[in-house]
Amino acid sequence: MGGQLYSSVARELDVPETTIRYRVKRLLDENVISISAFINTGKIKYENVAYIELDVEPEFLRRR
């Protein structure tokens, strides 16, 4: 996640950017989320396709 994205989310939530960085790092460290990169096929003159996958453990949701 880029620095501008952290800043944008922090502004939107009205929290310090360090809070967003800490929370994202914790979610990554605990394998709650992962970040992947894929080729933007639109930039190489092919049809764009977007895939979104969420794999959430129900126990994680119940803790909130």
Image (cartoon, rainbow, N blue to C red):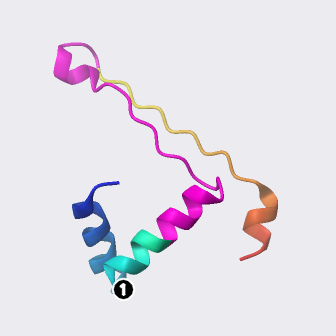
Indicate the quadrant containing the N terminus: top left, top right, bottom left or bottom right.
bottom left
Q: Which residues are magenta?
A: 23-47
20 with respect to 12 (left or right): right
Give the residue at x 37% y 81%: 13
Give the residue at x 26% y 71%: 7
Q: Is residue 40 above or below residue 60?
A: above
Tell me where residue 30 appears, x and y as whole percent. 65, 59
Residue that sits furthest to the front in the current view: 29
Q: Is residue 26 above or below residue 43?
A: below
Indicate the quadrant containing the C terminus: top left, top right, bottom left or bottom right.
bottom right
Tell me where residue 58 appears, x and y as whole percent. 79, 58
59 with respect to 21 (left or right): right
Give the residue number, with chain letter if any, for mark 1: 15
Q: Is residue 28 magenta?
A: yes
Mark 1 is surrounded, within 10 Å at the Cα level, by few (under 14), some (14 to 19) or many (20 or more) other residues, namely: few
Give the residue at x 76% y 54%: 57
**In the structure shown, which secondary structural element does the residue marked by tag 1 occupy?**
loop
15 with respect to 32 (left or right): left
The residue closer to the viewer here, 51 or 5, is 5
Tell me where residue 37 appears, x and y as whole percent. 39, 34
Badge 1 amino acid: Val
Tell me where residue 47 appears, x and y as whole percent. 28, 16
